[in-house]
Image (tube, helix red, strand yellow):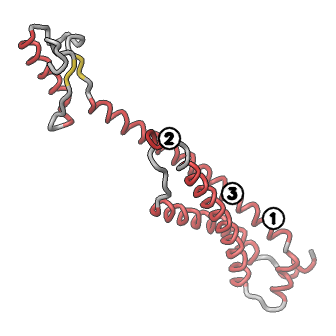
Amino acid sequence: SVYGVPYINNIIFKPKDPTRSEETITRVREVLGRRYKFDATDKDAVWIWDTAQFDKFIFYFFLAFNIFMGVIGSFTLGVGGIGVANIMYIVVQERVKEIGIKRAVGAKRLSIMFQFFMETFFIIALGSAVGFLIAFGITLALRFIPIKEFVGTPEISIEVAIATVSVLTLVGLAAGLLPARRAANLNVVECLRA
């Protein structure tokens, strides 16, 4: 009766065990129904907002959103890996004569393979650096937009950055493996004829 109203139209409480919120709400309705003479099954008599259900909804919503973003990210990484592999196949095809000359003057297959691995790694490192610069720029720009009350202050997580670089490195090296092996296994005579 803070507002001078002789009846209860709203109640806020937090059960000790959130898994028993439905049971607690039913019990609160029964107690209030006896005290204020209304049917405990009448949900309009006293409005009770179950924050546990809302918290559960928010949890599952963000879980689904994270899974969705993970799937999108996986597809993006897969497409990026295929793109890097195709670029490296083209690079190998364009440099067949150079590979033949290197092999003819004594370059080992392993050194040819290592060269193409390093080129693949450079492409991945350059793409990662550009991606991080874009992410940093977006994060910095969002700090000046007045949405902090709704989404908070955006920041780049070190753990996510390390995981991203690790996954990008693995995908890049996997994408560069077949083109590098192809370059290392080219026949020297056929390379020089090209």
**Which residue in the structure is indicated by mark 3?**
82
Residue 179 or residue 35, whichever sits in front: 35
Helix, strand or loop at label 1? It is helix
Q: Amino acid at mark 1?
A: Ile
Q: Position of residue 55 (x, y in %)?
A: 32, 35
Rendered-image quadrant of the C terminus: bottom right
Mark 3 or mark 2: name the one nearer the start of the chain.
3
Q: Which mark is residue 90?
A: 1
Q: In the displayed image of the protein, which residue is found farthest to the left?
A: 35
Which quadrant holds residue 56?
A: top left
Which mark is in front, 1 or 2?
2
Helix, strand or loop at label 2? It is loop
Taking the spot 19% from the left edge, 23% from the top edge, the residue there is 11
* Vertical arrangement, residue 60 with respect to residue 127, above or below: above
Task: Sort mark 3 into few (<14), some (14-19) or many (20+) by Cα contacts within 10 Å.
Answer: some
**Which residue in the structure is indicated by mark 2?**
147
Number of numbered callouts drawn: 3
* Vertical arrangement, residue 21 with respect to residue 87, above or below: above
Q: Amino acid at mark 2?
A: Ile
Q: Amino acid at mark 3?
A: Ile
Residue 178 or residue 66, whichever sits in front: 66
Which mark is in front, 3 or 2?
2
